[in-house]
Image (cartoon, grey):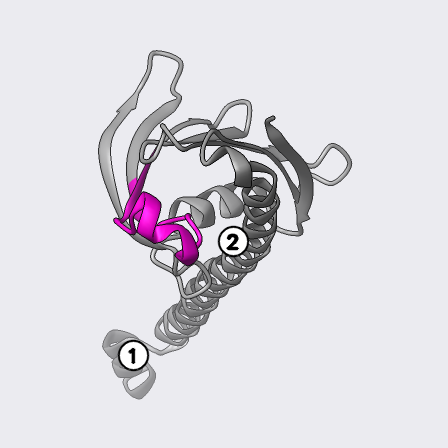
Amino acid sequence: MVKKEVQEYIYEHPWEVVTEASLRKYPNRWCPQVQRVETLRRTVDSSGRLLSRRLFQGTNPVPSWLHWLIGSEPAYAVEDSVVDPQQKTMVLRLSSLSLRNWVEVDETCTYRVHPENPNWTVLRQEWSCQWKEPSGMIAALENLSVERFRKTVANGRQAIKEICDDIERAADSVTSFAKEWSDRLGDAAREWVDEPTCGSRQDANHP
């Protein structure tokens, strides 16, 4: 039996910020299960879409009490992503590579602009998990996998929210800095324009 879960979440941040935060998500203290991420391919197609493939190395999803049977080696997964800046969509598809004789896990995340608020972003997550062995424990393992997914989802959202806040704070800081210096330069320019020139001072002293 395949276990499935679908969730939606609204980030109160623009799509551009959430997209950048998602791509910068790892490493992160909220997601310790992801140990390493390597970009295998990154291209831009004729439509201007960014196509990427990344390899993830993480902790073994198998419960510790089954390591004696299945092993405890790191787990691997591959993620294919499509970022469409014109349509303002990003789709991430993650599939497990390790332990496929035992369990298959797939996840799709879709980020879109909120239909009612253009400054918000809607995330839709679709997840599926199918344990194949050991046959006598499949139901219990699938329930454990659902619990793990829900916890991982909650932590992942928190990670993205924090990164979004960092991105917006940095942008605000740069904007504030630029405005401050623009004001200073404007004041200096006005002072320079208003200041009498040497010639005008000399003319004043010698009518």
Q: Nearer the viewer, mark 1 or mark 2?
A: 2
Q: Position of residue 132 (x, y in %)?
A: 47, 29
Which residue in the rendered view is the most extreme toward the bottom? 205
Q: Residue at x 37, y 69 (%)?
A: 185
- Considering the image in quadrants, where does the C terminus appear? bottom left
Disc 2 residue type (three-letter) = Gly
Disc 1 residue type (three-letter) = Asp
Above or below residue 111? Residue 87 is: above
Q: Is residue 59 visible?
A: no
Q: Are marks 1 and 2 in contact (CB under 8 Å)?
A: no
Q: Nearer the viewer, residue 154 or 164?
A: 154
**In which quadrant of the rendered view does residue 189 lie?**
bottom left
**In this picture, which residue range is highlighted in magenta?**
56-78
- Give the structural element (helix, strand or loop) at label 1: helix
Q: Position of residue 70 (x, y in %)?
A: 33, 43
Answer left or right for 121 relative to 99.
Answer: right
The residue that mark 2 highlights is 156
- Give the structural element (helix, strand or loop) at label 2: helix
Q: Position of residue 106 (x, y in %)?
A: 48, 30
Does the segment drawn in magenta span residue 67? yes
Q: Which label is found at residue 203?
A: 1
